[in-house]
Image (cartoon, helix red, strand yellow):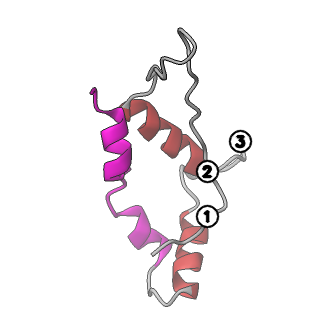
Amino acid sequence: MMLHAERGFSIAARSTGAPGNGAIPLHETRDGITQNVLITVLPDDDECTQAHPWAWLAELARARGLDVTSEELRGLPYEVVLTDRVARWLSPP
């Protein structure tokens, strides 16, 4: 279930080298993407006292029929899961 899609980041690949060789150097890592995702979901407000807006996320979840509190969300494991397509893109040829 997606709670919101208001934030995001993108990665652009640039071709370098001889024209026409089609080589796109990879300068991204699994850890780098994970850190970008975590930075993206953190609040922008420097005055925020929470690492994540748990109350807001709980409110979004309740609006979609999930009975959860901010305290329950805070206790869940927090992980970034990359799709198979991204994992293949990161794998060396």
**Are circles 1 and 2 on residues that touch, CB within 8 Å?**
yes
Q: Which residue position holds label 2?
A: 8
Image quadrant occupied by the N terminus: bottom left
Q: Characterize the local packing of mark 3: few (<14), some (14-19) or many (20 or more) Cα atoms within 10 angstroms.
A: few
Q: Earlier in the sequence, mark 3 or mark 2?
A: 2
- Picture residue at 70% right of the left edge, 46% below the top: 44
Q: In the image, is 54 to the left or to the right of 79?
A: right
Q: Earlier in the sequence, mark 3 or mark 1?
A: 1
Give the amino acid at mark 1: Ala
Residue 18: percent from left, percent from top: 54, 9
**Are circles 3 and 2 on residues that touch, CB within 8 Å?**
no
Residue sitting at the far bottom: 65
Q: Which residue position holds label 1?
A: 5
Of marks 3 and 2, the one in the foreground: 2
Q: Nearer the viewer, residue 55 or 93?
A: 93
Give the amino acid at mark 3: Asp
- Whole-Å distance between the Cαs marked 3 and 1? 22 Å
Residue 69: percent from left, percent from top: 47, 77
Name the element at disc 1.
Answer: loop
- Picture residue at 53% right of the left edge, 75% below the top: 58
Q: Nearer the viewer, residue 69 or 25?
A: 25
Give the amino acid at mark 2: Gly
Q: Characterize the local packing of mark 2: few (<14), some (14-19) or many (20 or more) Cα atoms within 10 angstroms.
A: few
Q: Nearer the viewer, residue 67 or 2?
A: 2
> Relative to 7, is 67 above or below?
below
- Whole-Å distance between the Cαs marked 1 and 2? 7 Å
**Are circles 3 and 1 on residues that touch, CB within 8 Å?**
no
> Relative to 69, is 11 above or below?
above
Query: Which residues lie in the magenta part?
Result: 69-93
Q: Which residue position holds label 3?
A: 46
